[in-house]
Amino acid sequence: MYHDKHQIISHYEKAIVFVESLASITEEQWRTSIVPGKWTVAEVIGHLTPWDEFVVKQRLPFLFTEESLPKGPTVEEMNTSAAKDSRAQSKEETIANFIKQRQQLIDALYQIVDEQWRQPFTIGDSELTLSGYFASLVDHDLHHFSQVRKSLRM
């Protein structure tokens, strides 16, 4: 469903609208686990920001060059750090950071020429296309947004 550049950009624009809508939830809702023993809404939203930044700064600039990709962080370390940051930030700060970084990602995607969208590249042992790479990131968003909606009964 989300395989073409414009569909993916559209998803990211809608994601900003969704996260902006969370400004209206209470602080208690923001700080409550989406499911007992799991992250809070704050942590779920907050963990997306450093991954967007990673894609913008450590993936996109290197994908169609001769330079090797910078080593990625471990998922657990990045997520733990992002969750901790989200617990320390205000709701407004977390939402603003998400919007700012997501907009940078959208802006970067607009700069990619259509021919590159299906051009294969390699990350580690995996051969991917931008289409496939971003489709999996969109699925990740949708998974978490569904969890948030369900926990907030939206």
Image (cartoon, rainbow, N blue to C red):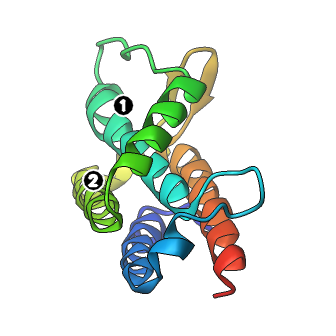
Q: Residues within 10 Å of mark 1 (few under 14, many from 20)?
A: some
Residue at 38% over, 42% down: 85
For residue 46, above or below residue 69: below
Total label count? 2
Which of the 4 quarters of the picture holds residue 126? top right
Residue at 51% over, 50% down: 134
Q: On the rendered structure, is 120 left or right of 5?
A: right
Q: Indicate which disc residue 59 carries.
A: 1
The disc, 1 or 2, on the residue closer to the chain's N-terminal end is: 1
Q: In the rendered structure, which amino acid carries the disc numbered 1?
A: Arg
Residue at 26% over, 60% down: 93
Asked whether residue 120 is in view, the answer is no
Q: Position of residue 83 (x, y in %)?
A: 49, 43
Q: Indicate which disc residue 37 carries.
A: none
Residue at 66% over, 60% down: 33
Badge 2 element? helix
Q: On the rendered structure, is 51 left or right of 137?
A: left
Residue closest to the eye, 66 or 38? 38
Q: Position of residue 66 (x, y in %)?
A: 30, 14
Q: In the rendered structure, which amino acid carries the disc numbered 2?
A: Gln
Task: For marks 1 and 2, give the one nearer the viewer.
Answer: 2
Q: Residue furthest front?
A: 28
Task: Tell me the distance, in whole angstroms, between the alpha carbons under discs 1 and 2.
Answer: 14 Å
Q: Which residue is mark 2?
A: 101
For residue 87, above or below residue 84: below
Badge 1 element? helix
Which of the 4 quarters of the picture holds residue 103? bottom left
